[in-house]
Image (cartoon, grey):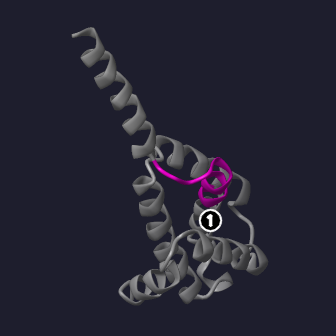
Amino acid sequence: MKKIILTLVILHFATSSFAGGHISKEDKEKAIKCLGHYTAITFIAANEVEAIQIEYALASYKIVKAYLLNEKVKEDEINKGTIEELDKLIGQSFNNERNDECNSFIYNLIPGSEEQIEKLRGTLK
């Protein structure tokens, strides 16, 4: 009986360790920083950023956050990291280089994300 219980406990921990996300800590942190970047874009004055950039930022935010949640990253961790990055970026003008870096990173991290973002962006009009 003890062997059965011990086996069940071991199986539980073994399977639960693999049931979590497969994203690396580095990729998770970078993705959350990109969420902060995309959020900051939505706070830029309308006369300082093109509407299409805001559409892409909103669509990217939605796709990246859904991906992180699917990878078992806790929503509190996502929100906290996003706000920390937003606090650093709020009030700055649109940074095209940073935007390109985040976009490239996200497109490589999340398979099919470029198409998903483009499709979602088209529905935000």
Specify the quadrant that holds the N terminus: top left
**Residue 23 magenta-highlighted:** yes
Vertical order, 105 against 21 (above or below): below
What residue is disc 1 on? 40
**Pointer 1 local density, CA inside 10 Å: few below 14, some 14–19, many at least 20:** many
Q: Residue furthest right?
A: 97
Residue type, label 1: Ala
**Residue 87 magenta-highlighted:** no
Vertical order, 40 against 114 (above or below): above
Q: Residue at x 43, y 48 (%)?
A: 72
Depth check: give the residue in front, 58 or 78.
78
Q: Residue at x 75, y 75 (%)?
A: 95
Vertical order, 3 against 23 (above or below): above
Specify the quadrant that holds the C terminus: bottom left
Measured from the top left, where is residue 118 in percent x and y? 47, 87
Q: Tell me where the magenta segment starts and ends, as one range.
A: 21-32
Give the overall secondary structure of the magenta segment: helix
Depth check: give the residue in front, 120 or 41.
120
Q: Residue at x 44, y 43 (%)?
A: 18
User: With 117 as the anchor, is 88 left or right in this view?
Assistant: right
Vertical order, 119 against 54 (above or below): below
